Each structure stands twice: as C-alpha cells, then as structure tokens.
Image (spheres, grey):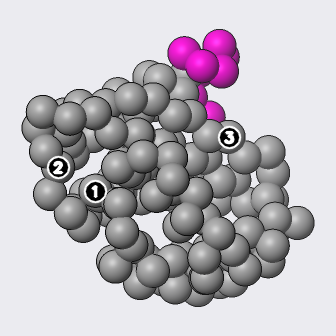
Amino acid sequence: MRGAMVDLPWQSVHAANHQRQYLALLSYLPLKGYRKMWMFSRHVRAIRRQLAGTPGLIGYSLRAKLFRHRFWTLSVWEDDTALTAFVGHEPHRTTMGALGPHMDATAFVRWDVMGSDVPLSWDEAMRRSAAESGRGAP
C-alpha cells in the first residue's frame, strides 16, 4: 500500500456499450481533519448502497489517502441527467449538507469516455485532474 492509499475495485452497475459515449466524473473530497472520518465513513456506506441500484450509473471506484484524509470518486454515467438525478436523491443530498462544512475545497473533473474504455484507470483520471487544475493532482 503506497502511503496508506487504498483503491476500492471498480464496481460495475450496468454494462457499458462499447460503441457509445458516456460521462466520466472524478470528484476530489478532502476532509479538513480526522475528527469527521467516522461520519464520512458512515455516509460513504449509505451512498454505496444508493449507487448499487442507481439508474444510469455504469460503474464507480473509490480512492482514499487515509493518513491525509483525502478521498476521490471515479464514476461513469449514461449522461448528465442520470448524474444529476443521483446527486439530488437521498442519501447523497443529505450527505452533501452534512459533510460540506467539514470539507476543504472540493474539485470535480468531467470528460467524455467511450464504453470501450470502461472501467476507467485511476492513472488516467489523475492525469486529467492535474491537467485541468494546471498544478498536478491533489
């Protein structure tokens, strides 16, 4: 394990059509400190249950740098409508409000991806994050 970095394996929810384009999303979620790790973990478990049955979700993975309390999600969606619906439903909606005050600056990177490229690689996602921010991946 590199510096207490943990990658949860890619979870396929729906099969990707290799011939079509999808929406990829990388989210960066830095907690301000260790004190809210338990609350963050509880919310992550609830959201993972939500993801399991989410229409329009192709798949997802999670990354954590535990000692630095930094977290990332990597997901592929049929389209922006599916992603927006997920974000607006429980428990994700409540989680944003509960964790928002305990987060440093979050970041989100979106790009188009072909179904033939699913599952996505963390290396590619972090390169995209670095390119978009102009300063390297967080």
Crowdedness near tag 1: few (<14), some (14–19) or many (≥20) residues, C-alpha within 10 Å: many
Residue in view at x 33 percent, y 39 percent? 22
Q: Earlier in the sequence, mark 2 or mark 3?
A: 2
Does the magenta portion include 132?
yes
Does the magenta portion include 61?
no
Magenta range is 131-138
Question: Does 118 sit left or right of 79 as displayed?
Answer: left
Q: Earlier in the sequence, mark 1 or mark 3?
A: 1
Q: Is residue 67 above or below residue 137?
A: below
Q: Earlier in the sequence, mark 2 or mark 1?
A: 2
On residue 107, the disc is 3
**Residue contact at pointers 2 and 1, CB within 8 angstroms:** yes
Question: Does 104 sit left or right of 129 as displayed?
Answer: right
Residue for badge 1: 58
Residue for badge 2: 16
Q: Nearer the viewer, mark 2 or mark 3?
A: 2
Crowdedness near tag 2: few (<14), some (14–19) or many (≥20) residues, C-alpha within 10 Å: many
